[in-house]
Image (cartoon, rainbow, N blue to C red):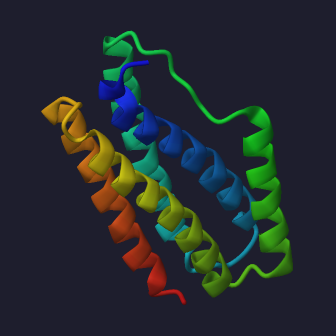
Amino acid sequence: MKEKNELLLHVYKDSDMSVTTLTELLEDLKEKDNKIKSVVEDLLKEYQSFLNRSKECLEKENIPLETEGIMTKMMANMGVSKEVKIDNSDANIADMLIKGISMGSIDMEKKIGDYKKEVEKKDLKVAKEFLKFQQKAIDKLKKFL
């Protein structure tokens, strides 16, 4: 794979994993009365948007779409379900999401630094928008702590 596609591929993989995880989280919260649900729904929509944007760009470049393996997704979903069963408070859910988004944000910052000279400006723009979205998401979630 070409280095020039690293940023978009990272946005795609991170968005794909996040869509899977947030969908599972919303399913686990379906019958519960959590105030954080609307924020999680908004995050899911944003991640879906980035997933679609990055997928479209990668397909135009004929880059194979790589996602996390089924086992990785299953383990993440099991972890989310377990956390919600143990403590479904808004604070606990916000904490769990902040930790996950923070890891993705750190990876994105590193990749932007590593590949900013190799990638096309439009791809760099998408990556920076994705990073900004992640940072804003963390700020929104902090209100529930």
Which residue is at 23% across, 31% downward?
A: 119
Which residue is at 76% across, 53% downward?
A: 77
Asked if 83 appears above or below 76 in the picture, the reply is below
Q: Which quadrant of the figure has residue 31?
A: bottom right
Which residue is at 57% across, 77% downward?
A: 94
Using residue 137 as the reference point, say whether residue 74 is left or right of it: right
Closest to the observer: 40 or 124?
124
Q: Position of residue 48 (x, y in %)?
A: 45, 42
Q: Position of residue 63 (x, y in %)?
A: 42, 15
Q: Which quadrant of the figure has residue 96?
A: bottom right
Closest to the observer: 74 or 123?
123
Which corner quadrant holds the C terminus? bottom right
Q: Position of residue 60 (x, y in %)?
A: 31, 13
Closest to the observer: 124 or 4?
4
Which residue is at 74% across, 79% downward?
A: 88
Q: Position of residue 6 (x, y in %)?
A: 38, 32
Q: Which quadrant of the figure has residue 83?
A: bottom right
